[in-house]
Amino acid sequence: MASELIFDIDSVDLEAQQMSRADISRYLPHRGPIFMLDRLIWMDDECDNAVGIHNVPQEAWWHDGHIPGMPLMPGVLMVEAGAQLASLMYYKRSAQTCFAGFTRIEDVRFRGQVTPGDDLLLLCQGIKYNPKRFITKIQGVVNGEIVFDGNITGMVFPKMGEVQRTPLEDGLMSGAGS
């Protein structure tokens, strides 16, 4: 697995905001504390590469229970945050309104810790795309260090029908980042 970033982000302004939480909520059906993508920093025009961020709240809902006295963000939530960025890339590229969920997680390695107050930078790179299925590489980075990486496969679930996506109001949700 990668020991370096999956693509060069030196030219990406990491303070930029291409989409806010409210903008993202128009694409992703997630709500409540599981809505983890706080900001889209950058996505290329082809929707092949993207950088997003999850601002880990000081009092995240898992804070007290996942290693009391030394709260660590669960790895499954790190992967979920990356999967949400992968899904956003898919929705932007395909203009689908059906539900796209992830069906496979492969070669995931956890390389570091994510703790309350961290900014989890998410990188996603498309490997394969068609209107029914996508495969991406994802990475999480905290303070310049890769904390996890792996591959996510997703697909459209047409029998679920169209998912309702009501825009969020920024700051309305408990634990929401800015």
Image (cartoon, rainbow, N blue to C red):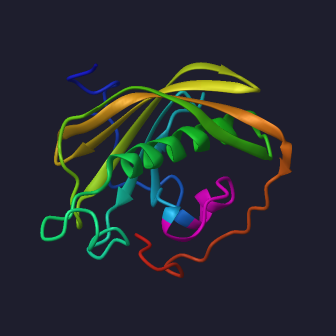
Q: Is residue 22 left or right of residue 97?
A: left
Total marks drawn?
A: 0
Quadrant where the image shows the N terminus = top left
Whether residue 112 appears in this view of the structure is: yes
Q: Split into 4 quadrants, where in the image is the C terminus?
A: bottom left
Residue displayed at 53% across by 62% down: 35
Closer to the camera, 74 or 122?
74
Q: Position of residue 33 (x, y in %)?
A: 49, 69
Query: Residue placed farthest to the left in the image?
Result: 69
Residue 30, quarter of picture? bottom right
Q: Say which of 102 and 27 sits in front.
A: 102
Q: Position of residue 34 (x, y in %)?
A: 51, 62
The question of residue 90 being in magenta is answered with no
78 is higher (above) or lower (below) than 11: below
For residue 150, above or below residue 112: above
| Residue at left offset 33%, top offset 55% | 15
Q: Position of residue 11 (x, y in %)?
A: 31, 34
Q: Is residue 26 magenta?
A: yes
Residue 14 visible in the picture: no
Left or right: residue 24 compared with residue 81 = right
Residue found 63% across the figure and 72% down from its top: 168
Magenta highlight range: 22-33
Residue ID at (59%, 38%): 89
